[in-house]
Every structure is written in C-alpha cells, then in structure tokens.
Image: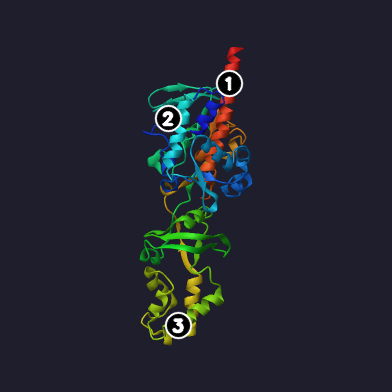
Amino acid sequence: MMAAITAAEHGGEVSLLEPNERLGKKLNITGKGRCNVTNNAGSEELLAHVAKNGRFLYSAFSRFDGRDTMRFFESLGVPLKTERGNRVFPVSDRSFDISGALEKRMRALHIQWIHDKADALLVNDGAVSGVAGEKQKYEADAVILATGGVSYPATGSTGDGYRMAQTVGHTLVPAVGSLVPLVSDDPCCAAMQGLALKNIQLTVHNQKKKVIYQDFGELLFTHFGLSGPLILSASAHLQDFEKNSYTLSIDLKPALDEKKLEARILRDMDEKKNQNFSSLVAGLVAHSMIPVVVERCGVDGETKVNSVTREARKALEMVLKQFTVPVTGKRPVEEAIVTSGGVKVGEINPNTMESKLVKRLYFAGEILDVDAYTGGFNLQIAWATGRAAGEAAAAEENKSKGSEAT
C-alpha cells in the first residue's frame, strides 16, 4: 500500500493486486492489534536495530525515517503517540486506523485495487512487462513485488513472491523465523506454563560462554519453551542451531546486586526461621516457580529454614540471579512475527529497490533478506522500502510515457 500510494503521488497509474478479502490483513494484527507503526527515531538509530543487512537500508532510511513515517500518517489524519522504547502507536490503539488511512489515501489517488493473486512475472528482453494473475494477465511498465515472507501464512504471506523472484533468476536466502518463540526441552518450562515474568534481565550465552544478547523486560513460559517480548527480540540473534547452542540466563532480581540480595534473604530467613524452605522461596518468586526453584537449590522443601545450610542459601542466591534455561531451537517460521531470509539484497539496487537482474522489477518489505528487532523497526523497513520502490517505479513509468510521446 505504501509503494502504491507513493507511485501514485509521483504521477504513476497504479493497480494493486491483493488476493485477500480486505487490505492490510497482516498489518491489522501487528502489535497485538494496536499496530506498532514505527519507531520515533532517525536513520542511524533505525539502522542500529536492524538484525541483518542494515547497510542495504541506509539509503531508504536516510530518505524516509521513523519521523517521516509519523508525519505521513498524521497527515492522513491518524494521531500518534510514542511509548516506552520510542515505540509509536495510533492514539486509538487500533491498527485498523492505520490500514484504513492507507486505504482511504489509495481511493483518493484513484489506485485500482484488483482482487486477484499474482502468479508469475511477465518478462520480455530482460525487462518486466507485467504480471500473470490467477484471473488474467496485467501489462505494466513496472512491477513492485511486496508479497511479504512466509510468517503468518493465513494473512497471505505464503512465499509466492520468493517463487516469482526465483523464477526470474534471483537468489533466495533460506527463510527462517525471526522474532519467534524459542523451544526448550527443560521440563521447568512446561511446569511453569503461563507464568509471565516482568522486570527481569535476560542474558543469552552461546556454547563459548559469549554474551549474544542482553536486555530488560518480560517473558512468558509456555508448554514448548519461552515466548514474550524479550524472547522474540533475543531470537533474532540466535542463528544456526545445528552449529550453535544457546543458554538463557534470567536474573529474577535485577534491582538487587549480590550483597543486597544476600541481605534480603538473610532477613527473610530470620523472620521465617521456623517455617519450611518452600515458604522462604515463596516470598521471593511467583507461586508456580516455587517447586522449580526449590528443586534447583537441592533442598527438601520441607526443611526448616533454621536448618538451611550456607551452601543451600548460596545456591538460592545463584538460582535467583542466574536462572538458566537451555534452548534447542525456534518455533516454526509460520509462527514468527517476521521472516529472516528472502531475496538476496546484493541483487537489488539499494537506492531504488530495483532488481539488478530484471529491469523495471522492484522489491519492497519482508520479501527482501532484511529484518530487525521488535519496536516498530520491521514496519519501518516496509514503509521505507515501499517508499523507495514507489518513487523509482513511478519515475520509470513516467520515462516510458515520455518515450511514447516522443
């Protein structure tokens, strides 16, 4: 939609092929239905939050950054607000206001929405000449592929764009999930299923004990492993589980250093000296976590607090500061918020998003091998690349019209 609007604003005669029954189906589920439109940031900060191939986006972000996106939507009559982490949402907390504004702008620009599914690119003499849909063929001076990746296939991201790009010679980087829940075979996850931990620090180490990722926030234990904002962000940093192994370390008490935590536990032990060890732990962690922490401390939960050894107390402190969970992989790519992988960016002109292999063929959004962390950065990639592709495609069409006139 951004590519179509931009092309039309620059004088292009635009048709949008969309097989879904309504526009913006995937957009409407982003941000849990609130739509994290973008991040209130300039190009340098945006690039710092791109997980893969950030340099490719330098030109697009330089010309259309997060603040440009905010101005664009506010000009369409959508009031925006900035929340923690510079995340931008519509004031209404309704993603439909974003998709609705885009649809209204398309109508104003007389963009034709064709309810059809693109099936193949039409190419003549090394240049695109149109698209074959399931219903008919459509001639065009330029074509923009903005078909998304393969995450949330029910929204239309079925990988068709990958297939079409590959058919005309483009290289595909295998698609994997990014911003996706993580799988663990540690029984503690199923035991604590449904438990959400807030205000904790997560650190991810690889097999070489190197810190891969660290941040504060919240996570969720599930029957298969872990999910939640921190986990989704961490997942973008975890690659190739066949060669690498990763361990999550959760600091349950990040506001307390080791000395303060020790003092807190000693105070609690004095107050509960005639109670069971499980009661002591109950004052420190959530209810469903009690038996897991007790087991990890190697202490019988029925042991009286006044009988707990120094070693056992130290073990409790260690568990609270470094609650470890090994992860064995990611959930299927279909469950990912975004797809990592796609059309190889080395085959795309970063200034125009035009294919270097097929003239007048452009790409925008998640079909490209670029992805970013949570916080509105992935949608910003969509807006910026859509903007760049729309401008370039319109310029190509205008040039073609000029040649015909000549």
User: Which quadrant is the C terminus positioned in?
Assistant: top right
User: What amino acid does circle 1 point to?
Assistant: Asn
Residue labelled with disc 3: 269
Say whether disc 3 or disc 1 marks the residue closer to the N-terminus: 3
Label 3, label 1: how far apart the Cα atoms are: 78 Å
The secondary structure type at the circle numbered 2 is strand
Q: Are marks 1 and 2 in contact (CB under 8 Å)?
A: no
Q: Quadrant of residue 381?
A: top right
Q: Nearer the viewer, mark 3 or mark 1?
A: 3
Q: Measured from the top left, where is residue 317 in percent x and y?
A: 50, 76
Q: Residues within 10 Å of mark 3 (few under 14, many from 20)?
A: many
Q: Measured from the top left, where is residue 358 in percent x and y?
A: 56, 28
* Residue closer to the observer: 327 or 382: 382
Left of 93 or right of it: where is 353?
right
Image: 112 above or below 248: above
Left of 152 or right of it: where is 211?
right
Residue labelled with disc 2: 119
User: What amino acid does circle 2 point to?
Assistant: Asp
Q: Nearer the viewer, mark 2 or mark 3?
A: 3
Label 1, label 2: how far apart the Cα atoms are: 26 Å
Left of 147 or right of it: where is 46?
right
Q: Nearer the viewer, mark 1 or mark 2?
A: 1
Q: Measured from the top left, where is residue 185 in percent x and y?
A: 41, 63
Q: Quadrant of residue 60?
A: top right
* Residue closer to the observer: 86 or 344: 86
Residue labelled with disc 1: 398
